[in-house]
Amino acid sequence: MNEIKQNTQTGNESDRDFNQNLRNAGEKKMEKIKNQTTGMKINDIDTLLEEDLIPNKSLIDQYNRKKLEAKKLRSRLTRLADEIKVLGDKIKNIGVSND
């Protein structure tokens, strides 16, 4: 059970690192766009934004889907661990009563 909690904590830390990296990358990209857009028309800026930001959005969506899937699996694993513990306790109780 401690291993699950440790993995959860490690996962949360890696989520924070990943999100921070995305923010940093997004800020750098926005700075790049800002530098490129000086003196450009609005339509050109919109096109530039679409070209530069949409691929990151798909990666973020994929990351969020995987994160949700991992959360569901973690919940299921915790539930199964609880069921195994209950069954183990029942087996111990049966063994004690037969002695």
Image: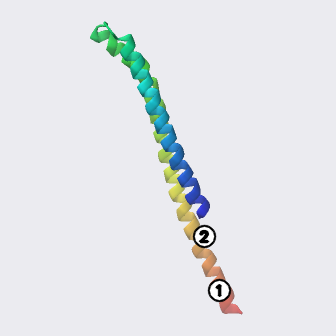
Kindly indicate whether the residue at mark 1 contacts the one at mark 2 (C-beta within 8 angstroms): no
| Label 1: how many Cα within 10 Å (few below 14, some 14–19, many 20+) | few
Q: Which residue is denoted by mark 1 in the rendering?
A: 94
Reading the chain from its start, which is encountered first: label 2 or label 1? 2
| Label 2: how many Cα within 10 Å (few below 14, some 14–19, many 20+) | few
Q: CA distance from mark 2 to mark 1?
A: 15 Å
Q: Quadrant of residue 35?
A: top left
Disc 2 marks a residue whose amino acid type is Ile
**Residue 62 seen in render:** no
User: What is the quadrant of the N terminus in the image?
Assistant: bottom right
Disc 1 marks a residue whose amino acid type is Ile
Label 1: state its secondary structure: helix
Q: Nearer the viewer, residue 19 or 68?
A: 19
Residue at the (45%, 35%) spot, across then down: 61
Q: Which residue is denoted by mark 2 in the rendering?
A: 84
Note whether 26 is above or below 90 in the view shown. above
Query: Where residue 72 sits: x, y (%)?
Result: 49, 52
